[in-house]
Amino acid sequence: MILGIGTDLANIERIQGTLDRFGDRFKNRVFTEIEQGKADRRKDVAGTYAKRWAAKEACSKALGTGLAMGISWKDMSVTNLRTGQPVMHVTGWAKDRLDAMTPDGHTATIHVTLTDDHPWAQAFVVIEALPTPVANP
């Protein structure tokens, strides 16, 4: 079953302006060290940060809270599998919210997809609850 859906559209030029103006202060407030390392190694640094910004916004919407109910930016982070597929991780209050909205007997999975076409970066997040497999005795 679908527990939540979120989307966000971020302007890459706006993120570049924020990086230019606030630099590490902005990066350290919003992004994990892993996200920063990934973005800072990419050719399109601002685009990479913009996609992750959009993913965090989309995730907070899928959780049904937005960023106003205690979720920290760093409670949501994006990594990539070896295939390049993005993966959303939640900790802290975001994890607590995810656990609270997941029905008993189910396990939540967060699906995320990212795209960009300058000057836009976009993310979609779908939170799905799947029945937890029962262990055989």
Image (tube, rainbow, N blue to C red):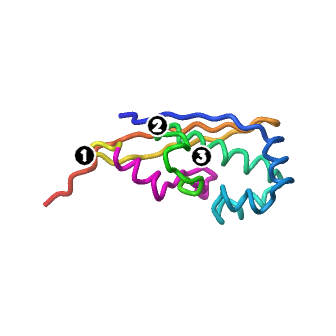
Which residue occupies 68% across, 36% down? 122
Q: Amino acid at mark 3?
A: Lys
Foreground disc of the pair 1, 2:
2
Q: Is residue 28 left or right of residue 76?
A: right
- Quarter of the N terminus within the rendering: top left
Label drawn at residue 56 = 3
Nearer to me, 27 or 47 = 27
Q: Residues within 10 Å of mark 2 (few under 14, many from 20)?
A: some
Q: Amino acid at mark 2?
A: Gly
* Res 125 quadrant in image: top right
For marks 2 and 3, the one nearer the N-term is 3
Q: Which residue is mark 1?
A: 104
From the top left corner, tell me how far across and down residue 33 is, in percent: 66, 66
Whole-angstrom CA distance, mark 1 to mark 2, is 19 Å
Q: Which residue is mark 2?
A: 64
Which residue occupies 52% across, 50% down? 71
Whole-angstrom CA distance, mark 1 to mark 3, is 26 Å
From the top left corner, tell me how far across and down residue 27 is, in percent: 72, 58
Which residue occupies 58% across, 36% down? 124
Q: Which residues are magenta?
A: 77-100
Nearer to me, 45 or 57 = 57
